[in-house]
Image (cartoon, rainbow, N blue to C red):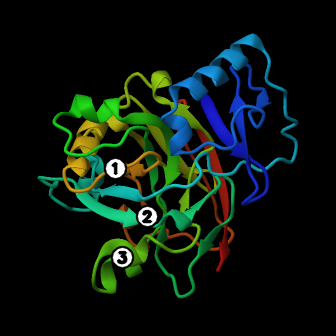
Amino acid sequence: MKLLRVGTAGRERPALLDPDGTLRDLSGLVTDIDGTLLADEDALGRIRSAAEAGDLPALDATGLRTGPPLARIGKIVCVGLNYHDHARETGTEPPSEPVIFFKAPDTVVGPDDTVLVPRGSVKTDWEVELAVVIGRTARYLESAEDGLAHVAGYAVAHDVSERAFQIERGGTWDKGKNCETFNPLGPWLVTADEVPDPQNLSLRLWVNGELKQDGTTAEQIFPVGEVVRYVSRFMTLYLGDVINTGTPAGVAMGHPEPKPYLRAGDVVELEVTGLGRQRQVLAQA
């Protein structure tokens, strides 16, 4: 299923995109799309049955904002340098273990919402990523297969980054990762049954119509199931937690000088196979 949330920021309603592209209202069945819903097989079954029976009312999508597809995110765990081609373009040896950092849930915005270039920024960068949504509490998992079994679904994430804040200002990466609006998510949360192989997905990103990233999750150093297993050895993953699994080659930081970092007025578009497409116009914070 393709689950989403539509409406003004903070007042989104749950919805479903059916196979013919019609937007369907779920508010008569569930109050929202969050980790609790994703762990409730009975509720998910009712949604599937109603969709198959044609019982869900249609929504007029004209002018309707698409919000983040997941409410009440607990934490966002991010994996850095998780693509062989991205490690090569940055001149970095592939890590022997996943590089982990965090984004705060309040960085999350809708897939087409405005992204703000932070004040004082000179190196705002783009990163298309596959996001994983946790559907079962995960702690001390033993195998990559166990990791995949704890995934409820997948979404497109834009891990916007400020490289000077991240690398040149001391401390951890978090300063360059947690600026407001720095994690557009969606448009859909696609349930795991519709993504049989998360290591066979294409990721693409354009800036002002020019293709910048064109990669595949087959290039991941640590595959999705292994990432979930690994993270669960260091922290408990709860229902509705999100993992951003890294970005392929093609980021601004990997370009020769002058590096084409983002500025107010730029338009970024990105997509992952089967998970939908985002479009953001950048503005100055």
Residue 56, image quadrant:
top right
- Marks 3,1: beta carbons within 8 A: no
Quarter of the image where the C terminus is located? bottom right
Q: Earlier in the sequence, mark 3 or mark 1?
A: 3
Q: Secondary structure at mark 2?
A: helix
Using residue 186 as the reference point, say whether residue 126 is left or right of it: left
Is any atom of residue 275 visible in this view? no
Residues at marks 1 and 2, CA–CA distance in whole angstroms: 31 Å
Residue identifier under label 2: 252
Q: 266 or 143: which is nearer to us?
A: 143
Residue identifier under label 1: 237
Residues at marks 3 and 1, CA–CA distance in whole angstroms: 25 Å
Mark 1 crowdedness (10 Å alpha carbons): few <14, some 14-19, many ≥20: many
75 relative to 239, above or below: below
Residue at (39, 49) in percent of width and height: 238
Residue identifier under label 3: 166
Q: Amino acid at mark 3?
A: Gln
Horizontal and vertical percent position of residue 41 = 51, 26
167 relative to 181, above or below: below
Q: 260 or 179: which is nearer to us?
A: 179
Q: 2 or 117: which is nearer to us?
A: 2
Quarter of the image where the N terminus is located? top right
Q: Secondary structure at mark 1?
A: loop
Mark 3 crowdedness (10 Å alpha carbons): few <14, some 14-19, many ≥20: some
As drawn, the residue found furthest toward the left would be 96
Q: Amino acid at mark 2?
A: Ala
Foreground: disc 1 or disc 2:
1
Horizontal and vertical percent position of residue 241 = 43, 50
